[in-house]
Image: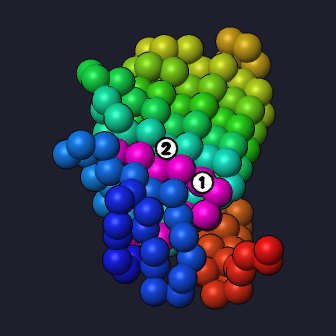
């Protein structure tokens, strides 16, 4: 990623990102990940290869830790947090939609968490599942693999999602991360 000084990280292409250590809690960002300059990453946050974090997203690992797998996109305005007791773990090849809120939960590989949805403490979203836009997944809920969870509170429909249903969206955000890394420049 490049040189780091007082919480501002500068990559080799000159993009300034809001990445902060908090005491001994220091983010670990893979060199191939992309963090938009208007996103905020604080503390114990681990971002995998080709993961992307978009404008207005906040990943705050001040109490617990946050892990984001390879090729996962954290879209605009999403809030990812953890508690002292509960980490927030997001697998590889996931799409975390705009304005989603995840805290103290597990999102396994290949999931889509829709825009404006909320996934709470001790919830587990199994591989390939979909959380619909605006859904609220209550604490302790287990969403089975390839299921769909819709509504408030979310109701689960088993076997509703085709395998690799989100692969095109994952690939789009990986490509977007490469594009932004190469082409984004501030005009002021």
Q: Quadrant of the N terminus?
A: bottom left
Using the image, tell me which numbered label, if any, was put on residue 31: none
Left or right: where does residue 82 sit relative to residue 155? left
Q: Which residues are magenta?
A: 30-48
Query: Can residue 105 be seen from the camera position used here?
Result: no
Q: Are marks 1 and 2 in contact (CB under 8 Å)?
A: yes
Q: Secondary structure at mark 1?
A: loop
Give the quarter of the image for residue 84.
Answer: top left
In depth, the one of 157 and 134 nearer the eye is 134
- The residue carrying pointer 1 sits among few (fewer than 14), some (14 to 19) or many (20 or more) residues within 10 Å by Cα, namely many
Scheme by which the image is coloured: rainbow
The residue that label 2 is drawn on is: 59
Residue drawn at the location 60% of the way across and 20% of the way down: 137
Rendered residue at 54%/70% (across/down)? 16
Provide residue 147's location: percent of width, then percent of height: 61, 34
Q: Earlier in the sequence, mark 1 or mark 2?
A: 1
Q: Against 170, is 24 above or below?
A: above
Q: What is the spatial separation of the Cα atoms under label 1 and label 2, in whole angstroms? A: 8 Å
Residue at coordinates 56% horizontally, 26% vertically from top-left? 119
- Say left or right for 177 vs 91: right
Say which residue label 1 marks: 39
Against 74, is 83 above or below? above
Local packing at callout 2 (Cα closer than 10 Å; few below 14, some 14-19, many 20+) is many
Residue 82's spot in the image, x, y percent?
39, 30
Q: Secondary structure at mark 2?
A: strand
Q: Position of residue 59 (x, y in %)?
A: 49, 44
Vertical position of residue 178 compared to residue 174: above or below? below
């Amino acid at each position: 990623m490049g040189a780091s000084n007082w919480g501002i990280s500068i990559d080799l292409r000159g993009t300034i990102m809001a990445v902060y250590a908090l005491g001994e809690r220091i983010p670990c960002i893979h060199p191939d990940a992309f963090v938009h300059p208007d996103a905020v990453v604080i503390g114990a946050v681990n971002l995998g290869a080709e993961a992307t974090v978009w404008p207005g997203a906040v990943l705050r690992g001040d109490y617990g830790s946050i892990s984001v797998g390879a090729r996962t996109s954290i879209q605009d305005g999403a809030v990812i947090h953890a508690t002292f007791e509960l980490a927030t773990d997001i697998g590889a090849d996931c799409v975390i939609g705009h304005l989603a809120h995840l805290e103290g939960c597990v999102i396994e590989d290949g999931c889509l968490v829709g825009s404006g949805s909320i996934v709470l403490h001790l919830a587990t979203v199994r591989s390939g599942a979909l959380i619909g836009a605006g859904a609220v997944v209550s604490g302790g809920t287990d969403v089975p693999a390839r299921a769909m969870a819709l509504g408030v509170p979310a109701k689960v429909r088993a076997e509703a999602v085709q395998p690799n249903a989100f692969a095109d969206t994952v690939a789009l955000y990986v490509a977007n991360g490469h594009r932004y890394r190469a082409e984004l420049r501030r005009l002021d």
